[in-house]
C-alpha cells in the first residue's frame, strides 16, 4: 500500500531524476511525463539513467503548453499508466519536475494510509476564488478559447470580447458544477479511476479541451462528482504572485520550508543545491523537525506581492516612479507647513518645537538656502541646504526630505517669497497639514526699513504669488488638511487656531497650550496698509485693518506670557 | 527611434574595426551563461577583486575591451581562461565613451545571453545577492518576462580624505570606501527615451552644487537579456528599443532593482582625474574630472553618510527594491 507519484517534467532533467529516485528509494512508484519540447537525445539519456529502477515508468509524451488541455492529457496518460502498472498504489500524487518533497516520504505514505478514502484536491466554485489570471473566472467555462494566451494575446482578448458582445456561450455538460483549484492534487485510486473510466469521459474531455486553463478545473470539477470525501486543500506548497506565476524557492528559504506543513514544495530553483541536499536525504538523517509555521511563508510572499503592486508610500526611486494620481501615498508621513506664522510671531519656531516636540524647520524653500532646523547645512539623508540643488528638483527635494525623516514629524515654514514649485504636490497630499495666515508676508515689509517704492513692488509681487498659491489650496483637487485665515481674522483670536493645529499634530503633551508665541508688534500696521493703498497697490489678503488703530487685543500693553488653563 | 537604433548598430560595426583581438575564449561560452562586458584603461590594480567578485556571483565569461592601457592590464587579462580580450588605441570619446565597442561585442557574442555591462569600479548588488547568484536572478527575470534590470549607480567613498588609504590589488574596495549618501537623489523622467534621469549623491552635493544640471547621471541598466537588435545609447543609462528602459513601475508598485556600488574614490583617483583631464576623453568635456581637479581632494564624507552593510539596508533605505522576488 503506497502512493504513486506522477511527475510532469520539462526542464532540469537531472533534478527530476534525483527527485524520482528519492521517491522510489522509499518504495513509491513514479510515472514520468516528459514534455516533447525535450529533444530526443536528451530524453533518451534521461530514460537511460532511470531505466534500471523497477519502480519508474515513462508515459506517452505530449507537447505541453501553459493554459491548454495538453497538460491534462499528459497527466491522464501518466495516471492511466500508474493505475495499470502498480496495483499497490492507493493514492496518486501529481507533481512537477521542480517539486521537492519536504518531509520524509514515509511520513506522506503513513499520512495517506491513515486517510484511505480522502482526496486532497483544492476545489472551490468559481464564485469563491480570488486568484484568476486575465479576469476570467466563470467565463473560463462558458466561452471558447481557440487562441493561445501566451502567443496570441491580442487574438485571445479580442475573441473573448467578441463572445461577450454577442453573448456566445457554450453549455456546461449536465451534472458538472465548475470548480477550480491548485493543479497539484493527490487523489485516491478510486476517484482517479472513476474519472478516467467514466463512460462520459469522451464528453468531459471534449468539453474541457476548450476550457481556459483546464488543468486547474478538470480534476477539480470531476472529483466533486465522484469523490466521497474531498479535503479541499493541496498537499503541495505553492505560492503565486500577482501575475499567477509561481514563486520560486532558493537556498535561503531552507529554514522557511522546514516550517511548512506541506509534504511537497513547488517550485524549486534547479540550482538550489542546498535545498536538494537538505531535503533529499533518507529519513534517518533528515533534519530535526521544527514546529510547522506555514503562516510565515504566506506572509513573506504576500508581502512580496504587495511590494510589487502597492509599493512603499512616498518612495520615489529607480524602479518606482508613479504617474500623477497613482502614487499610493504622495509622501511617506504626515508633516505640517506653516505660512505666515513665523512672520506674525517673533518666536514661532522655538515655541512650536516646545509645544509639539516635532522638528521645526525654517523656510525650507527660501531663495538663498534651505533653512533646516538648528541652522544645519545638511539634513537626514545627506540632503544639502544648497538652493541650486534644491530648486533643480524641488519636488524630489521635498519627497526625499520626508522619506529620509520618516518616523519623525516635520514642520516647516513657507511663504510667497519661497520657491513655489512644490505647491501642487503639497496641496494634493493628504499627509500635509497646511496652515496659512494670508497676508502675513506684509509684516516683515512693514518692519523693514526700505524705500517705499521697493516695498510697494515687493508687496505686489508677494500678494500675487500668495493669491495663486491660495487658489491651488482652494482647488477641488486639494487633498491636504488645509486651514486658511486672513491675518485680521487670525489676530482676533489666535489661541483657538493654534490649539487646533497643535492638537492635530498630536504631540506628546496633548493638554492645553501652556504658553503662546509672542506676536510681532503691529503698531501702525493699519497705516502701513493704507499707505500701500494710497500708492495704488491694493493689499487684500490680510483682511481689513482699521487705518489708525491697532487691533483690539494688541492695544493692551504687552504682557509676559501667561498660562491658559 | 528605429532609425537611430539602426545608425547605432552601423556605427558599432564600423567602430569594430578599431578593436584588435588579443585573446578570444568566446568558444567556451555555453548557452545559458551570464556574460560581462567592460571597457577599461589602466585598471590592473582593481582587476583581481573585480573578476573575483563577478565570478563569485555567477558570471561565466568576461568580454573586455582595453583602451590603451600602459600598465599590466593586458598581460594580466590574457592569462585568465574565462576572459576574452580586445584592445584598441582609438579615442574613447570618438566611440561614444566606449559604448560603440560594447554594442558591437554584445551584438556579436551576447545574443540570447543575460549580459552585465559595468566598469571595473562598479559592483552589482541585487536583491538576495548574498545568497543567490546572478543566474538565479536572471532565471527569475526570464520567467517573469522581464528583459532588463535597473541598478542605480551609488557612489561609495571613504571616511576621511580620499587618498588616505592605499588600495592594493585584491583588496575589497568596499572595505575602505564603505560610505554613501542615502537620500539625496533627484529623479526626472526622460520622455524621449522613456528612462528616468537620476542625479544626486556626493558628486552632485560637493562638485556640482552650483550647476546641478551637469551632475552625473546615476540611472543605469547594466543587466540585459541581450538581443542582437539592442543598443546602448548613452553609456548604460539607456537603451533602444525604448521598452528596455521601462524598468520602473508607474502605477505605484515597485519593480525589482539593484544598485551598482561605484567605488571610484580610491587613492588612485587623484592621478586618474589628472590624467583623464589631459586626455579630455570623458563625457561633457570631462566636466566631472575638471570639477574634481579644481576642488582638490575633498572629503566626501558627512555626518549623514551611511555605512554600507548589505543589500537589505539599501532596500530599507529605498535605493533598491526586491519587487515581487521573494
Image (tube, coloured by chain):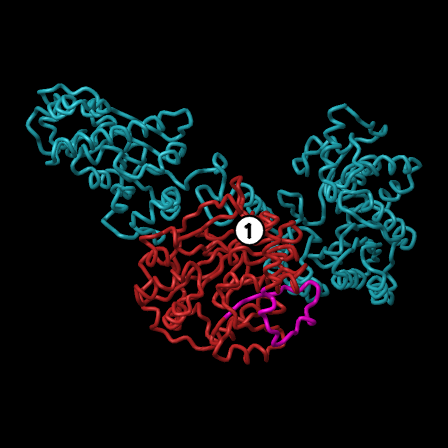
Chain colours: A cyan, B red
| B32 magenta-colored | yes
User: Does the magenta run of residues contain A552?
Assistant: no
Q: Residue furthest right?
A: A199
Residue B87 shown left or right of residue B43 in the figure: right
Task: Find residue B117 and report its image quarter.
Answer: bottom right
Q: Residue at x 61, y 49 (%)?
A: B3
- Bin the neighbour count of mark 1 within 10 Å (Cα to Cα): few under 14, some 14-19, many 20 and up: many
- Asked if residue B15 can be seen in this view, the reply is yes
Q: Which residue is mark 1?
A: B256
Give how far across and how far down residue B102 sits, in percent: 57, 63
Tell me if residue A508 can be seen: no
Give coordinates of residue B30: x percent, y percent. Answer: 70, 67
Q: Looking at the image, is A159 positioned above or below residue A65?
A: above
Q: Residue at x 55, y 51 (%)?
A: B256
Find residue B61 and report its horizontal and vertical position in percent: 62, 69
Q: Locate the N terminus of chain A and report the quarter of the image it occupies.
A: bottom right
In the depicted view, which residue is nearer to us: A502 or A455?
Answer: A455
Q: Is residue B227 above or below residue A507?
A: below
Q: Which residues are magenta?
A: B15-40
Q: Which chain is home to disc 1?
A: B
Q: Secondary structure at mark 1?
A: loop
Q: Position of residue A505 (x, y in %)?
A: 31, 35
Whether residue A360 is situated above or below residue A259 in the rendered picture: above
All told, the count of numbered labels is 1
Q: Which one is in front, B301 or A286?
A: B301
Left of A562 or right of it: where is A182? right
On screen, residue B263 versus residue A438, left or right, reads right
Amino acid at each position: 500500500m503506497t502512493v504513486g507519484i506522477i511527475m510532469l517534467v520539462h526542464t532540469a532533467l537531472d533534478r527530476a531524476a534525483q527527485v524520482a529516485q528519492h521517491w522510489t528509494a522509499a518504495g513509491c512508484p513514479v510515472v514520468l511525463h516528459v514534455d516533447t519540447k525535450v529533444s530526443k537525445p536528451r530524453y533518451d539519456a534521461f530514460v537511460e539513467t532511470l531505466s534500471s529502477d523497477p519502480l519508474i515508468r515513462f508515459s506517452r509524451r505530449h507537447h505541453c503548453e501553459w493554459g491548454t488541455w495538453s497538460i491534462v492529457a499528459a497527466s491522464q496518460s501518466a495516471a492511466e499508466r500508474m493505475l495499470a502498472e502498480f496495483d499497490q498504489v492507493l493514492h496518486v500524487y501529481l507533481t512537477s519536475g521542480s517539486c521537492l518533497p519536504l518531509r520524509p516520504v514515509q511520513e506522506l505514505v503513513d499520512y495517506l494510509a491513515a486517510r484511505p478514502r480522502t482526496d486532497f484536491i483544492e476545489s472551490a466554485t468559481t464564485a469563491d476564488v480570488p486568484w484568476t489570471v486575465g479576469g476570467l473566472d466563470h467565463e473560463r467555462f462558458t466561452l471558447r478559447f481557440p487562441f493561445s494566451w501566451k502567443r496570441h494575446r491580442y487574438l485571445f482578448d479580442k475573441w473573448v470580447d467578441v463572445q461577450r458582445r454577442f453573448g456566445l456561450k457554450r453549455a456546461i455538460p449536465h451534472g458538472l458544477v465548475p470548480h477550480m483549484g491548485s493543479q497539484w492534487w493527490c487523489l485516491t485510486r478510486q476517484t482517479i479511476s472513476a474519472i478516467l473510466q467514466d463512460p462520459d469521459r469522451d464528453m468531459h474531455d471534449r468539453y474541457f479541451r476548450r476550457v481556459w486553463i483546464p488543468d486547474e478545473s478538470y480534476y477539480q470539477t470531476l472529483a466533486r462528482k465522484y469523490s466521497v470525501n474531498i479535503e479541499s486543500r493541496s498537499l503541495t506548497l505553492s505560492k503565486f504572485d500577482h501575475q499567477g506565476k509561481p514563486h520560486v524557492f532558493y537556498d535561503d528559504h531552507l529554514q522557511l520550508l522546514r516550517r511548512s506543513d506541506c509534504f511537497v514544495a513547488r517550485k524549486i530553483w534547479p540550482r538550489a543545491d542546498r535545498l536538494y541536499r537538505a531535503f533529499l536525504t533518507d529519513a534517518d538523517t533528515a533534519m530535526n523537525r521544527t514546529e510547522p509555521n506555514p503562516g510565515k511563508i504566506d506572509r513573506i510572499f504576500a508581502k512580496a506581492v504587495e511590494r510589487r503592486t502597492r509599493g512603499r508610500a512616498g518612495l520615489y526611486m529607480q524602479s518606482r516612479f508613479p504617474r500623477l494620481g497613482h502614487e499610493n501615498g504622495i509622501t511617506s508621513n504626515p508633516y505640517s507647513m506653516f505660512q505666515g506664522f513665523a512672520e506674525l510671531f517673533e518666536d514661532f519656531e522655538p515655541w512650536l518645537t516646545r509645544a509639539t516636540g516635532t522638528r521645526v524647520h525654517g523656510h525650507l524653500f527660501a531663495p538663498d538656502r534651505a533653512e533646516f532646523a538648528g541652522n544645519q547645512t545638511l539634513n537626514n539623508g545627506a540632503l544639502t541646504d544648497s538652493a541650486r540643488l534644491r530648486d533643480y528638483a524641488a519636488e524630489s527635494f521635498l519627497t526625499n526630505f520626508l522619506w529620509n525623516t520618516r518616523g519623525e514629524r516635520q514642520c516647516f515654514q513657507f511663504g510667497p517669497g519661497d520657491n513655489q514649485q512644490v505647491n501642487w504636490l503639497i496641496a494634493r497630499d493628504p499627509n500635509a497639514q497646511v496652515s496659512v495666515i494670508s497676508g502675513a508676508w506684509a509684516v516683515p515689509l512693514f518692519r523693514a526699513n526700505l524705500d517705499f517704492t521697493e516695498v510697494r513692488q515687493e508687496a505686489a509681487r508677494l500678494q500675487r504669488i500668495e493669491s495663486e498659491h491660495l487658489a491651488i489650496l482652494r482647488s477641488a483637487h486639494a487633498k491636504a488638511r488645509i486651514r486658511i485665515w486672513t491675518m485680521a481674522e487670525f489676530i482676533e483670536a489666535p489661541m483657538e487656531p493654534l490649539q487646533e493645529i497643535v492638537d492635530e499634530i498630536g504631540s506628546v503633551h496633548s493638554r492645553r497650550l501652556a504658553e503662546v508665541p509672542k506676536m510681532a508688534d503691529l503698531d501702525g500696521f493699519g497705516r502701513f496698509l493704507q499707505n500701500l493703498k494710497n500708492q495704488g497697490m491694493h493689499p487684500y489678503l490680510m483682511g481689513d485693518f482699521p487705518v489708525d488703530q491697532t487691533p483690539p487685543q494688541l492695544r493692551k500693553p504687552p504682557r509676559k506670557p501667561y498660562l491658559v488653563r | 527611434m528605429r532609425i537611430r537604433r539602426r545608425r547605432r548598430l552601423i556605427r558599432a560595426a564600423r567602430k569594430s574595426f578599431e578593436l584588435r583581438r588579443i585573446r578570444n575564449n568566446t568558444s567556451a561560452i555555453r548557452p545559458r551563461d551570464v556574460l560581462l562586458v567592460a571597457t577599461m584603461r589602466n585598471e590592473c590594480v582593481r582587476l583581481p577583486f573585480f573578476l573575483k567578485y563577478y565570478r563569485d556571483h555567477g558570471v561565466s565569461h568576461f568580454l573586455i575591451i582595453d583602451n590603451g592601457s600602459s600598465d599590466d592590464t593586458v598581460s594580466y587579462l590574457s592569462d585568465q581562461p574565462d576572459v576574452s580580450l580586445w584592445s584598441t588605441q582609438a579615442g574613447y570619446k570618438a566611440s561614444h565613451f566606449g559604448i560603440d565597442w560594447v554594442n558591437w561585442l554584445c551584438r556579436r557574442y551576447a545574443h540570447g545571453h543575460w549580459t552585465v555591462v559595468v566598469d571595473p569600479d562598479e559592483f552589482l548588488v541585487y536583491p538576495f545577492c548574498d545568497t543567490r547568484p546572478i543566474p538565479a536572478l536572471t532565471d527569475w527575470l526570464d520567467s517573469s518576462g522581464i528583459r532588463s534590470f535597473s541598478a542605480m549607480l551609488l557612489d561609495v567613498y571613504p571616511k576621511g580624505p580620499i587618498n588616505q588609504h592605499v588600495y592594493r590589488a585584491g583588496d575589497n574596495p568596499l572595505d575602505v570606501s564603505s560610505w554613501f549618501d542615502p537620500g539625496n537623489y533627484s529623479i526626472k523622467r526622460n520622455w524621449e527615451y522613456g528612462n528616468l534621469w537620476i542625479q544626486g549623491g556626493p558628486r552632485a552635493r560637493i562638485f556640482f552644487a552650483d550647476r546641478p544640471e551637469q551632475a552625473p547621471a546615476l540611472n543605469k541598466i547594466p543587466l540585459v537579456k541581450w538581443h542582437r537588435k539592442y543598443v546602448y545609447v548613452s553609456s548604460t543609462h539607456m537603451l533602444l528599443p525604448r521598452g528596455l528602459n521601462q524598468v520602473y513601475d508607474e502605477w505605484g508598485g515597485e519593480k525589482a532593482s539593484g544598485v551598482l556600488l561605484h567605488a571610484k574614490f580610491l587613492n588612485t583617483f587623484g592621478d586618474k582625474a589628472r590624467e583623464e583631464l589631459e586626455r579630455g576623453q570623458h563625457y561633457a568635456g570631462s566636466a566631472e574630472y575638471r570639477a574634481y581637479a579644481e576642488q582638490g581632494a575633498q572629503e566626501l564624507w558627512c555626518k549623514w553618510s551611511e555605512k554600507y552593510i548589505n543589500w537589505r539596508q539599501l532596500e530599507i533605505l529605498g535605493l533598491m527594491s526586491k519587487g515581487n522576488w521573494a
